[in-house]
Amino acid sequence: MRPTGPLMGLVVVDMAQMLAAPFAAMLLADFGATVIKVEPREGDSTRRAGLRLNGTSVWWRLLGRNKYSVTLDLKRSEGRDLMLRLLDGADVLIENMRPGKLETLGLAPTELHARNRGLVILRITGWGQTGPYRDRAAFGTQAEAMSGFAYGNGHPDGPPTLTSFPLADGAAGYLGAYGVMAALWQRERDPERRGQVIDLSLFEALFGLLGPQATAYDKLGTVTERQGNRSPVSVPRGIYRTRDDRWVAISCATEQIVGRAFAAIGRPELYDDPRYKSLTARLAHIEEVDEIMGEWIAQHDLDIVVRRFTEVEATVAPVNSIREILEDPHFLARETVVTVDTKDVGPMKIQNVFPRLEMTPGRVQWAGRETPGDDNSLWVERLGLSLEELVRLRQKGIV
Amino acid sequence: MRPTGPLMGLVVVDMAQMLAAPFAAMLLADFGATVIKVEPREGDSTRRAGLRLNGTSVWWRLLGRNKYSVTLDLKRSEGRDLMLRLLDGADVLIENMRPGKLETLGLAPTELHARNRGLVILRITGWGQTGPYRDRAAFGTQAEAMSGFAYGNGHPDGPPTLTSFPLADGAAGYLGAYGVMAALWQRERDPERRGQVIDLSLFEALFGLLGPQATAYDKLGTVTERQGNRSPVSVPRGIYRTRDDRWVAISCATEQIVGRAFAAIGRPELYDDPRYKSLTARLAHIEEVDEIMGEWIAQHDLDIVVRRFTEVEATVAPVNSIREILEDPHFLARETVVTVDTKDVGPMKIQNVFPRLEMTPGRVQWAGRETPGDDNSLWVERLGLSLEELVRLRQKGIV
């Protein structure tokens, strides 16, 4: 069994820890790249992060999926030498140490490029490789704060709000995988086949997807304030509690949908009311609009609400927790969640590979390897070491 | 002037509207691809979405940047024919109509592939091309609800919370750009050089970056609940108000950083207190920890808080709105926001191109074209039409 998908044949070395960088590497592995995770002998710290199954983190099981695991002591010269030889045969290196740390390990990009000019080097950090904050520590929380996300998330009468999810890391993972592929595309068209260094910061990855904030402020003085579940361009828009104590999300991005939403709650005449007939009018009467929607929804069960809105083609969705997700017919039909087998905890549910490529889709072949160095035979296969040599390196604690 | 970057030479046709799909196309244009936006003669609806400058939306100015604009009436057979001829010379088509709509326009993927087998077709929709909800309308709001994001966003005593930003669309844009590059990579290695269809849904793009929810629930019954600014794996973690009425984000992802954070507020002894000495202990005393942090921070200005935390290498960041972002020395030093000139509203600030590729970085060459069809000369250049023919098509309302 090996990873399968559009990137088969590509070789990626992942020496990164939680969270964005190994996620980027996972996306490449999901699409069939040969991703070799280099861990210290005691195992990557991700193995111990957050909730665990049989001692191994659920994060590791996700981020490590479809990857091979080898161990290496990078601080010893024999270890560094093996790393260099491994990178000689690689297309991509992914790392997320603080700026300068890779260099102190003797793995500076210029040195790596002197040996393998085709290597694409993705460097993910909180603040990037340049600028006055480059040496500061940072995690996703700081990126959410710096990028403007937290400021605009939450309710008007409450504080700026962080998410319960690693949003900046997720965004940086997606963007990093794209950056790697773009650099590889360029390399293949470069007469000298040069790989290049990619500087990706968490705060910019998140800032980059928040829309035209800079333009709106620069030209109009507009700041995106916390607005709870409301929106300045969509009324009604909100999350309402249903009779059966669930929540449902309604939004009306066009005037047509507003009419449908009023029809869904059996009040089509509302759309002829001058108080509700345009976005401007509805913004001026937003409390009433919310009350009308909220009251009707509070008197109906979630199923009914979704059915009524769907029948008239208004936009609606239940607010799911993972509990509901795992039973949702749409998630089931699309196999948005699949089951993967593990040696130590048996079958385990895990999200599928996205997006779906019709011809060469990716696939979850295995979850994060149970034991660091499960694939140390790769040292033999890829570098041509003898088995005796591998045993010696193992005994010396190098691999 | 033309777009520059690693993807120069790649030809992309963008026939998509707000928001994820044109964002994916923008990312390709940012890296130098020739992205041709096909608009109806009255202009893409994005031009009228949300805040406007001189009548043209700030969203259009962002999403349309680095793209060419041509006009076309796809509903007339001559228009369809021109589209087919344009696609004959393209590498990628990006669309986001509801499933089946492309087919009714006579542009079904099988037909397109019969003419140009190498075409990669990225299809972005709310619910994807398959499954029981495929025909439902959906926007980012519904994706935030369905994916589990909204359920876990907000405060424990408040409702599930939507963001003020188009998060699902942003995630889908990033992931879509990656998917396109992966499919192109595969095509270049396919003996028959076949492009493929990519099915990308907003709800899965967001679900895919929320972490190992499915595994945690399946094996441990754990559901990610709304937790405000707290975290089950990092205490203290929060957003606190400073004396000068700003907000600051603190998080302590490791025990070492906890010690530093206590040192930053001049209370290093706290880390020896059994109530605070481990994550478990701090979770049990989370109200006290938050109070200690919050009180000290409330007595100090933001600058002081950031300096004190930074000095001891604890993780900290100011909560910025776009107002502060545009003056932040780190954003300035990295040119995270740049200025682009426009014909109609003069110089305009806009986010830069991320991530940074050292050798062939992208660049903001122009903002969204002021007028639909500004680049209708491309019909002549790319399809070899005569100028007379172009004039005739223009007069007939085809382009």
Image: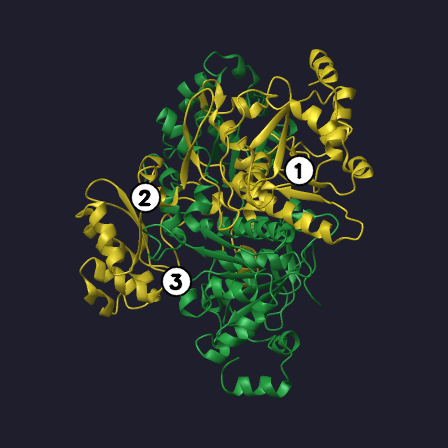
Chain colours: A green, B yellow
* Residue identified by numbered label 3: A100
Q: Say if labels 2 and 1 share a chain.
A: yes
> Cβ–Cβ below 8 Å for labels 2 and 3?
no
Task: Out of A113 and B226, give the one closest to the viewer.
Answer: A113
Q: Which mark is residue B60?
A: none
Judging from the image, mark 1 belongs to the subunit labelled B
The label nearer to you, 2 versus 1, is 1
Judging from the image, mark 2 belongs to the subunit labelled B
Secondary structure type for disc 3: loop
Judge left or right: residue B260 versus residue A352: left
First along the sequence among labels 2 and 1: 1
Q: CA distance from mark 2 to mark 3?
A: 27 Å
Q: Say if labels 2 and 3 share a chain.
A: no
Q: CA distance from mark 2 to mark 1?
A: 40 Å
Seen in the picture, residue A46 relative to A352 is either above or below; the reply is: below
Seen in the picture, residue B327 relative to A166 is either above or below; the reply is: above
The amino acid type found where label 2 is placed reads: Val
> Cβ–Cβ below 8 Å for labels 2 and 1?
no
**Residue drawn 43% across the image and 42% down it:** A207
Seen in the picture, residue A315 relative to A170 is either above or below; the reply is: above
The amino acid type found where label 1 is placed reads: Val
Task: Out of A226 and B316, give the one closest to the viewer.
Answer: B316
* Residue identified by numbered label 2: B319
Seen in the picture, residue B70 relative to A369 is either above or below; the reply is: above
* Residue identified by numbered label 1: B11
The amino acid type found where label 3 is placed reads: Gly
Secondary structure type for disc 1: strand
Choose top left, top right, bottom left or bottom right for residue B349: top left
Whether residue B325 appears in this view of the structure is yes
